[in-house]
Amino acid sequence: MYNILVVDDEIMVCRGISLILSQSALPLGDILIAQNGFEALDLIRLERIDLVITDIQMEQMNGIELMETIFLENPAIPVLVLSAHGEFEYAQKAMKFGAKEYIVKPVRPDHLITIVGKALQDRETMLRSVEKEELARKYQLQEKTSGGPGVILPELVFEGTDEREALELLAGLGYRELEERFSLLLVKPDLKKGGRTDLLITSLRDRKLMKYACRNVVEETVKEWKPLVFDLSTGLLAAILQLNEQDALYAAEGSRAATIAQKVHNNLAEYLNVDNVIGISGVGVGIGSWPELYRDAERALNWHQVHDDHYVFYSGDFAPSVIAEDVQADAPAEKREDAKRQSDVRRVISEAKAYIDQNFRTKGLKLQDIAGTVHLSPNYLCYLFKKDLGLNMWDYVTECRMEEGKRLVLTTDMRRYEIADEVGYETPEHFSKIFKRHFGVNLSEFKK
């Protein structure tokens, strides 16, 4: 049975969708309702959610911001978006950041049921139905193509050339209309195992087939960015993402770049059972920037040698002066660098914690806001926070809110709605639900 979360600031829309789904033949369990993005995130953190249906236009946290946080914390949850006729641009943006489908209001019951059913089915079967024979056929066709993308694209990434020649070469490959801005994603898949079993893959042919399957997953995951995906002689997979002006601004923030990479990592692990590490570059202008973008993504990827329990690295989170050779060098300088890194991490965590302590009462507080104060992507800051303090960053926010709420309950005559407002919750009902989950008793029982 699948649990569905419906998010819309119009309660009648939530109830209507809930009614339609509850009367359908879909194998559904609980259908939960949230009236804003913050309530939705708390429910996702508390309950097992298999699918989210969210409105695009909501106050304080819109649907795209909600999706970004979902993919940061639990990228396996598929998301469907609701949009009015005049919000097509928002819907397109949502599709780029991982929405499976968008549903135009007013909602038609048969259309809604079809889309929800397909999204749930896709979650279970995506890519698992790909047959090895089909992969082999495609792979062999590509291998026979000389001077194709598998030759020219790596050359442009490793060596580069002048813009005019590059455009001519790419036009010959069918890439005639390119955006001006790019970002490069490097994937390092572990091809020694994967698929439906944990058996080692010892055959060269099977490893090639698995790599081709990985390339398909990468291409499908980032398809909204009109990607150029190809193999490199280093054993890595590369994906050049084309960014329009708005995308480039988002990617430059780091948080959305890491979100894209996190989705790729998650899909490779979920659908192919392939361990993988990903590095993603900043944003470059023109094809001439590709070699530097490659080096940028490679530097990010090499930080896995320092953080071997983390798997997605955005170059903007790391100083470019610290490269793989520094990490690997067996010299006193390495120890000094390691001590400096540890000191920097403690400083960053201390600053993030201090910001939370001062701002946890703020309604609309987001992980992105906290990460912005220390100039890191949310993906990386959440990793460092949990590694250093032993708990998730948002769990710490909730703990601060609950402790302050408990203090106000015990020491003041404030009403429930006043306390909820004071500690950052939109509604007293939502505050009560989180309070009971945190302390194990209802507010009324606690006060007695």
Image (spheres, rainbow, N blue to C red):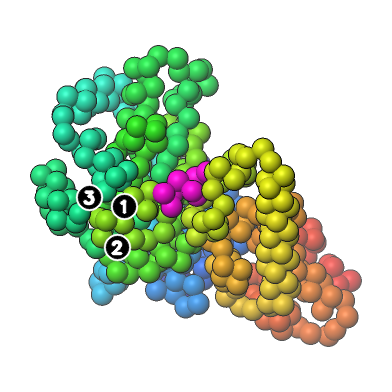
* Region of the chain picked out in magenta, as a range: 295-302
Given contact means CB atoms under 8 Å apart, are the residues at marks 1 and 3 in contact? Answer: no
- Visible residue check, residue 182: yes
Residue 269 is covered by the magenta coloring: no
Q: How far apart are marks 2 and 1 (CA)?
A: 9 Å
Which label was assigned to residue 85? none
Residue beneath disc 1: 290
Q: Is residue 444 visible?
A: no
Q: Earlier in the sequence, mark 3 or mark 2?
A: 3
- Report the residue marked by disc 2: 285
Figure check: 233 above or below 440: above
Given residues 20 and 429, the one toward you in this image is 429
Magenta highlight on residue 296: yes
- Secondary structure of the residue carrying tag 3 is loop
Quadrant housing residue 62: bottom left
Q: How many labels does the image show?
A: 3
If you read the primary sequence from the N terminus, does the residue marked by circle 2 or circle 1 appear first?
A: 2
Where is mark 3, residue-wise?
161
In the image, taking residue 78 as reference, residue 356 lies left or right, namely: right
Q: Earlier in the sequence, mark 1 or mark 3?
A: 3
Residue at point 24%, 63% (across, down): 180
What residue do we see at 50% from left, 33% from top? 275
| Mark 2 Cα shell of 10 Å, populated few (<14), some (14-19), many (≥20) | some
